[in-house]
């Protein structure tokens, strides 16, 4: 029986891979990877390494999670070094925890190699620090997949009244509802927010707006994209460094 490395691929820029992730990728017999993991990373694998694509679309899973769990397990029965490569960090909305539990229940050993999550790195490449002295003392990373209109929502919308930064992942299709909900709980219409698409890659694009106009401004934004809500967005005006310089 082999060992599974639940490995974070980072957000897109291949150089944001950790040294540890690169080592297990070079040693891998099989790499099971997602749509969000930059496929250029696979070039680092040794000759004869097998590649298994289990890509998922935002919110719409092409390969059901149960099947992915089983694919990882079956590969661990066949191979010594299995890399499960996931975009960003495996435990930040990556369902890495579920995969780890599935393996644990079947006696397969695993480790977790954290990755740089898009939740902080895409804002960083957009010139938006997720915390900033005097502006935001914390940041939250929230699923945007759940509709804000859902009854018995697990998301504590009422607590989003403060100026702490909120990063919504998987939220582009719900942006009209999210921005409306934030205004309903009392955030001003002109409250700053940004949508960052394909963060940290050469195709990165950033749209800055307000809760009131962000939807109209982001009609054709390609995915993956995340939403940053907070006064920290205003710092981009001075801190933008990446686009045009890459
Ligand atoms: N584990 C990943 C997140 C998986 S959820 C991580 O830590 O980054 C998938 C969501 O992440 C997407 O819907 C999008 O909101 C966000 N995302 C991932 N990569 C991104 C990128 N390069 N730029 C912007 N958003 C990204």
Image (tube, helix red, strand yellow):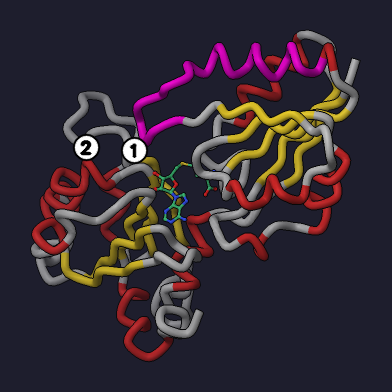
In which quadrant of the rendered view does residue 108 lie? top right
At 35% from the left and 26% from the top, the residue drawn is: 60
- Label 2 CB-ligand 1 distance < 8 A: no
Density class for disc 2 (Cα within 10 Å; few <14, some 14-19, many ≥20) is many
Q: Which residue is mark 1?
A: 155
At 72% from the left and 33% from the top, the residue drawn is: 31
Residue 67, magenta (yes or no): yes
| Image location (x, y in percent) of residue 57 | 39, 33
Name the mark on residue 174. none
* Count of marks placed on residues: 2
Q: Secondary structure at mark 1?
A: loop
Q: Is residue 230 above or below residue 183?
A: below
| Image location (x, y in percent) of residue 187 | 17, 61
Q: Are marks 1 and 2 in contact (CB under 8 Å)?
A: yes
Q: Nearer the viewer, residue 131 or 198?
A: 198
Residue 71 falls left or right of residue 34? right
Q: Is residue 64 above or below residue 185?
A: above
Residue 169 falls left or right of residue 44? left
At 83% from the left and 12% from the top, the residue drawn is: 77
Q: Residue furthest front?
A: 47
Q: CA distance from mark 1 to mark 2?
A: 8 Å
Foreground label between 1 and 2? 2
Residue 76 falls left or right of residue 142? right
Q: Earlier in the sequence, mark 1 or mark 2?
A: 2
Q: Is residue 141 above or below residue 3?
A: below
At 61% from the left and 22% from the top, the residue drawn is: 98
- What segment is highlighted magenta in the picture? 56-76
Q: Which residue is mark 2?
A: 148
| Image location (x, y in percent) of residue 124 | 49, 72
In which quadrant of the rendered view does residue 4 lie? top right
Residue 163, magenta (yes or no): no
């Amino acid at each position: 029986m082999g060992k599974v490395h639940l490995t974070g691929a980072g957000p897109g820029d291949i150089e944001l891979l950790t040294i540890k992730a690169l080592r297990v990728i070079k040693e891998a017999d099989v790499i099971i990877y997602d749509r969000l993991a930059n496929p250029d990373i696979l070039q680092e694998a040794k000759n004869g390494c097998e590649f298994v694509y289990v890509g998922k679309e935002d919110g719409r899973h092409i390969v059901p999670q149960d099947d992915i769990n089983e694919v990882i397990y079956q590969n661990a029965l066949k191979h010594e070094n299995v890399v499960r490569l996931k975009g960003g960090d495996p435990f930040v909305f990556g369902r890495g925890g579920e995969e780890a539990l599935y393996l644990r229940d079947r006696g397969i050993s695993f480790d977790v190699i954290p990755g740089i999550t898009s939740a902080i790195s895409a804002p960083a490449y957009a010139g938006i620090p997720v915390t900033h002295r005097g502006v935001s003392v914390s940041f939250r990373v929230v699923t945007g997949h759940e509709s804000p209109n859902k009854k018995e929502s697990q998301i504590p919308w009422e607590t989003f009244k403060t100026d702490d930064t909120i990063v919504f992942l998987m939220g582009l299709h719900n942006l009209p509802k999210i921005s409306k909900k934030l205004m309903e709980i009392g955030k001003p219409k002109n409250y700053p927010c940004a949508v960052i698409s394909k963060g940290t890659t050469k195709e990165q694009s950033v749209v800055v707006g307000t809760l009131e106009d962000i939807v109209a401004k982001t009609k054709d934004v390609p995915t993956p994209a995340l939403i940053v809500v907070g006064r920290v967005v205003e710092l981009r005006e001075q801190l933008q460094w990446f686009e045009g310089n890459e």
